[in-house]
Amino acid sequence: MPQLDTSTWFITTLSATITLFILMQLKISLHNFPQTPSIKSIKHTKTNNPWESKWTKIYSPLSLPQQ
């Protein structure tokens, strides 16, 4: 059974990694980012939930008086 030649694996993986790095750098450098990002105003709208109009109190069993 012939032996697998692994002598070129290092240079193959190294060149593939360098090529992918260069391609990603080119892709990122060609992307147009905004120079001065503007602040967007967020408008909060009040939603009327039925449980907000009622007064409710939740009692924890540990806060109740001992009987």
Image (cartoon, grey):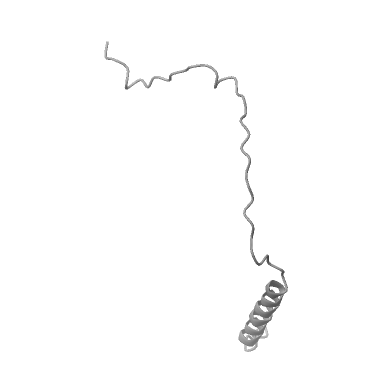
For this rendering, which residue is in front, 51 or 24? 51
The vertical placement of 10 against 40, above or below, is below
For residue 11, what is the image quadrant? bottom right
**Rendered residue at 70%/77% (across/down):** 26
Give the position of the C terminus as an image quadrant: top left
Q: Judge whether 23 appears above or below 63 on screen.
A: below
Residue nearest the observer in this picture, 37 or 5: 37
From the viewer's perspective, tell me whether residue 61 is left or right of residue 49.
left
- Residue 10 is drawn in which quadrant? bottom right
Q: Is residue 38 above or below residue 51?
A: below
Q: Nearer the viewer, residue 7 or 58?
A: 58
| Residue occupying image coordinates x 68% and y 72% | 28
Give the position of the N terminus as an image quadrant.
bottom right
Q: Residue 6 placed where, x, y %?
A: 63, 85
Indicate the position of residue 20 as horizontal and vertical percent values. 68, 77
- Along the line of sight, which residue is nearer the eye, 30 or 7? 30
Q: Which residue is painted at 32% across and 21% down in the image?
A: 63
Residue 32: image x %, image y %?
72, 69
Q: Position of residue 19 (x, y in %)?
A: 68, 81
